[in-house]
Image (cartoon, grey):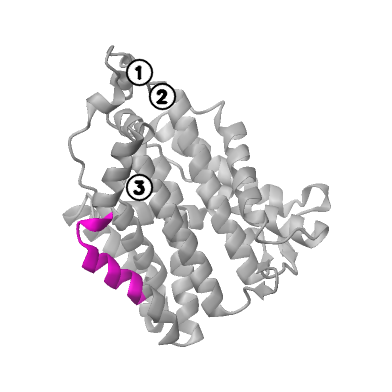
Amino acid sequence: MGQANGTDIREYFTAQPLRVSLVVAAFAVYPFLVSDYFIDIAFFFGIYALLGLSLNIVLGEVGLFDLGHAGFYAIGAYTTAILNTKFGVPVLALIPVSALAAGLFAYLVCSPVIHLQGDYLLIVTLGLGEIIRLALINNPFDLTGGPNGVFGIDFPALGPMVVDSSIEYYFLIWIIVGLSILGLLSLQHSRIGRAWNYIREDETAANASGIDSRKYKLLAFVLGAGLAGVAGNVYASKLMCVSPESFTFMESCLMFCIVLIGGMGSIPGVLVGAAFISLFPEIFRPFAMYRMLIFGSAMILMMMFRPGGAWPRKRGAVGLKSLFDDTGRSDA
C-alpha cells in the first residue's frame, strides 16, 4: 500500500512537470521582482493558504462543518507568544509545539461532540471559537494580556540565521505550505484519506463496512487544528504580537469561504480560494466602501454557476481493494 501511495504522488507531480516547474520558479523569483508591500501580500496569501488547507481536512475531506477554526489558529499563535516571551523558547522550536497544543486542544474539546452532525456540529464549533476568543480577552492566569494581547515576540532564528525580512518570511511560509501540500496529497491517497471520503459520502455505510467513523473524524479535527496552529506560529512571529481581535468569527468565515470558493477537498482549489480572499481586498482597495458588497456578490455568483468551486477535486474510482485485505475485513 505504501508503494502504491508513493506512485500516486509521483504521478501527480510528473503528469505535467513543465507546469509544476514554472509555478515553483515563479514563486521563487517573485519576491526579487516586487516591493516589500507585495511580498507581504504574498506572505498573507501563504497564511490563508495554510489555514485553508487545515480546514479542508475537516470540511473538504470528511464533510464536517467547522465555523470555529480560528480558535485553533489562536491556540497556536498564543502558545508561541507566551512560551517565547515568558520562557524564552525559540520561535522555530515552537512550530511543532504550537501544532501539538492546538491538536491536543482539539482532541479534548471535540471528543465529546464528535458524534454531532450537520448544523448541530456547526453551532457547537461556532460557540467554541467564540469561547476561546473571550477567554483570551479575560486573560486567564495573567498569560494572554487581555484585549491588548502579547507583545515582543522574537524573530524565528536557526543559529546565526535570523528570519527578519519580508523575503525570508515569504520563503518560510511557502516552504511550510509546500511541505503541507505534499503531506496532504499523501494522506488523500492513503487508507486514511479513503476512509475520510467514505465517511463524507455516507457515514452509515462506512460504519457498516467496519470503518470507525468517530476515530477518523476526530483525527481530521486534530490534524486540521495542528496545521492551523503552525499558521498561528508563523503569523505571531511575523507581527511580533498577537491579540484576540485577530481571531474573530470573521476569520473562521473567511477560512470557510476559502474551501467553498476553491472546491471542497481540492488542494489546488484551496490555493485559488486563498488567493481570492487575500488578494481581493488589495485589488478593490480604492473601493473600500463597497468591498463587502462586491465580495458577497462574487460568492452568490460562485454558488449559482460553480457550486463545486473554482477548481473542484476530480474524484476517481475508489480502490476498494486497497482498503480491504484479502479476507474482506476492513483495515481502516
Q: Callout 2: helix, strand or loop?
A: helix
- Tags 3 and 1 in contact by the CB under 8 Å rule? no
Q: Which mark is residue 213?
A: 2
- Tags 2 and 1 in contact by the CB under 8 Å rule? yes
Residue type marked 3: Leu
Q: Is residue 267 above or below residue 22?
A: above
| x then y, percent, for residue 214 | 46, 24
Q: Which mark is residue 207?
A: 1
* Residue indicated by mark 3: 185
Q: Which residues are magenta?
A: 13-26
Does 84 sit left or right of 221 as displayed? right
Question: Magenta stretch: dominant SS?
Answer: helix
Q: Nearer the viewer, mark 3 or mark 1?
A: 3
Q: Nearer the viewer, mark 2 or mark 3?
A: 3
- First along the sequence among labels 2 and 3: 3
Residue found 50% across the figure and 65% down from its top: 173
| x then y, percent, for residue 151 | 74, 67
- First along the sequence among labels 3 and 1: 3
Residue type marked 2: Ser
Q: Is residue 25 above or below residue 106?
A: below
- First along the sequence among labels 2 and 1: 1
Residue found 48% across the figure and 69% down from its top: 44
Q: Callout 1: helix, strand or loop?
A: helix
Distance from the alpha carbon under mark 3 to that under mark 1: 24 Å
The crowd level at tag 2 (other Cα within 10 Å; few <14, some 14-19, many 20+) is many
Q: Nearer the viewer, residue 89 or 262?
A: 89
The crowd level at tag 1 (other Cα within 10 Å; few <14, some 14-19, many 20+) is some
Residue type marked 1: Asn
Q: Callout 3: helix, strand or loop?
A: helix
